[in-house]
Amino acid sequence: MPSLFDLQNALRDVSLGGDASTLASTIIGDGFIPEQRLIVHRNNTTILLSEALGATYSVIKKLVGDEFFNAVAALYVRAQPPHSPCLFEYGEGFGDFLATLPATTDLAYLPDVARLEWMWNAAFHAADVKPLTSADLAPVAPDAYGDLIFSPHPSLRLISSAFPIKEIWDVNQCDADPDATVNLDEGPQALVVLRPKASVEMVELSPGGFVLAQSLANSAALEDAFAAAQHSAPSFDPASTLAVLISVGAFQSYTLRP
Amino acid sequence: MTNLDHAAHRFASPVSASPLPVRAGIGLKAQHYQDIIDTAPDIGWLEVHSENYMCAGGPTQKWLSAMRERYAISMHGVGLSLGSAGPLDDAHLTRLCDLERRVEPGAISEHLSWSIADGVYLNDLIALPYTEESLDVFSTHVLQMQDALKRRVLIENPSSYLRYAHSVIPEPEFLLNVAQRSACAVLLDVNNVFVSAMNHGFDPIAYLDQIPADLIGEVHLGGHSQVVFDDRVLRIDDHGSKVCDEVWTLYERLIQRTGPKPTLIEWDSNIPELSVLLDEAAKADRILAHAAIREEVRHAVAV
C-alpha cells in the first residue's frame, strides 16, 4: 500500500504525461482498464490548464489557431506546471517557452506578443494605487529635480520588440476589424504597459524614452536616467518623455536622493 | 465532552451551517457580470471560485464588490487541496482569509479531494484513497482551515473516476467521519454523487440518504458529459450542460427528506447566456418552494 505522499506524486507524474501503467495495480479497473481511469485525470489537467493559458494568451491563440495552441499549451503544462492555484498567475514563462520551439521559428514575433499579453495580464491584476501627478511634485525645489527617484506604479511593465507588437495585439482583439492587417516591417517598438485606473493602457515610447523609463523604473535618480537615455539616443529630448510618463500614471510616489 | 462537541464549541460563531438564503443561487461567471448588474435578476445568491479573486487589485475585485452589494456570496475554493499529504500552503490560506474578510461570504467551502502534489497544482479535483492516513490528513487540514478562518466550512463530496485498491472506508462514511472530527458541514453535490455512482456502480440514493439533513449547508447541481471507452461510458463532471433528469429526480427526493437547502446551479465550461442559468435556478427554486410548503403543512398539522 503506497503512502499518500507517494501515491499523489505518482499520480501527478501520470497527469503530466508519465507512464500510467506504473499506477495500474493501485486502481480498481471495475469494467475499465485502470489506465483509462487515470487518463481522465491527465486530460483534466491538460485541458483545464490549457484553457487557463488560452484565457491569458487569447491573442497567441488567435494567431496560431486553437489546434496548434492546444498542442503547444499541453507541452508547456507538462514542462512548467503551475505552483499556485490562482491561475491568473500561471503562464509567466510562456513567451520564453514559445521562443524555444522549432515549430514557431517562422513566427518570430510570437514570443514578444506573448510577453506583451503577460504584461497586460499582470497589469490587469496589479494592486490599485493612485498614480503620482505633476502636482505632487510641487514641493520639490527645481534644484533638486535631478535627485528625484520615482517609485513605479505597481501595474507598470516595459517591453521592447523588433516587431510592431501593439498593432499585432490590436488587430487580434475580439472587437477588431477582421480585415485589418499589420506590416511586420513597422517594428521595432517599445511600450509601457500599465493600468493607472480601470483599464490597461499601452503607450509607445521612442528608443531613448524606453531607456529613460527603464532607468526610472529601476530607481535611478532623474539626472542619471536623463544621461543614460541621451547617451543611448543623442538627439533624444528626455523632458517631454518624462512628462508623458507622469501623465499616463507610470509612477506612484517619489523620494529625493540623499 | 465528545470530540464533536469539543470541535463545535471551538467554532461556535454567529455563522450557522446554512447562512445563505434558502433559495437557488448561480455560479458567477465573468461573461455574466454586466448582465447581472444591468438586469438585477431575482436570484438567491452567487457563488464564486475564491482563487479567481485573490489578485492584488484590478477590475475583477471591483466586480465582486459590486456583486456583494447586491447579493449574498458563497466562496467556493478549488485550490487549498485539503487532501494533499504534507502541510497546507500557508500563503494560500492567508490569501483565503484576506478574501473572506473582504467579502464576508454567507458560506465558504472546499472539496473532499486533492489537487497539489509536492507543490505542483494540477487544476483537477482528484479523489483520495479512503484510508485512516487520509482521514487524519484531511480532518487535520479542515481543522486548520477553520482555525484560520474562525468559522465553520462546508466540505463537498467529489465526483470520481477512479477508486484505489487500498481504500477501506466507504466515501459517505469517510465524509461523515471528517465532519465529526472537524465539526465541518457538508456541501452535498447531487450531480457528483450521481456521476460517481454511475462510474463505480453504487446506488446514489443510498449514498444521499446517509448524509444527515442538519449537516447539509448547501447543495450543488450541475451538468456532466460522457466519454466512451470500448463501449463503456465514463461520466465526466465538466459543468458544461444542463442538470440531467436523473439528477433532478435525486435532488427532489433529497429535498423532500431534508427540507429546503441553499442550492447552486454550477456551470463552468461552454458557458451559455445568463438566462439559461436563471431558468435552471428557477427550476430548483420551485422544488425548494414546494418543500417549504410541505414543511409548513407538516408543522401546522403537528401543532
Image: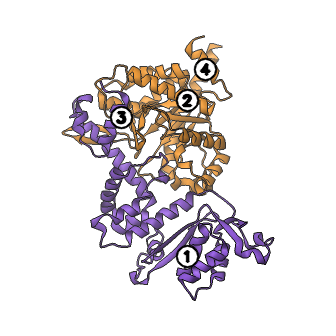
Chain colours: A purple, B orange
* Label 4 to label 1: alpha-carbon separation: 61 Å
- Specify the farthest residue to the top: B1
Residues tagged 1 and 3 counted as in contact (Cβ below 8 A): no
Q: Earlier in the sequence, mark 2 or mark 4?
A: 4
- Check disc 4 and report the residue beneath it: B8
**Residue drawn at point x = 22 percent, y = 40 percent:** B229
Q: Give a yes or no on whether discs 4 and 1 share a subunit.
A: no
Residues tagged 2 and 1 counted as in contact (Cβ below 8 A): no
Q: What secondary structure is marked by label 1?
A: helix
Query: In which quadrant will I find the C terminus of chain B?
Result: top right
Q: What secondary structure is marked by label 4?
A: helix
Chain on which label 3 sits: A
- Check disc 2 and report the residue beneath it: B144
What amino acid does circle 4 point to?
A: Ala
* Label 2 to label 3: alpha-carbon separation: 21 Å
Depth check, mark 2 against mark 1: the one in front is 1
Q: What secondary structure is marked by label 3?
A: helix
Chain on which label 1 sits: A
Q: Give a yes or no on whether discs 4 and 3 share a subunit.
A: no
Query: In which quadrant will I find the N terminus of chain B?
Result: top right
- Check disc 1 and report the residue beneath it: A211
Q: Quadrant of residue B25?
A: top right
Q: Residues within 10 Å of mark 1 (few under 14, many from 20)?
A: many
What amino acid does circle 1 point to?
A: Val
Which label sits on residue A83?
A: none
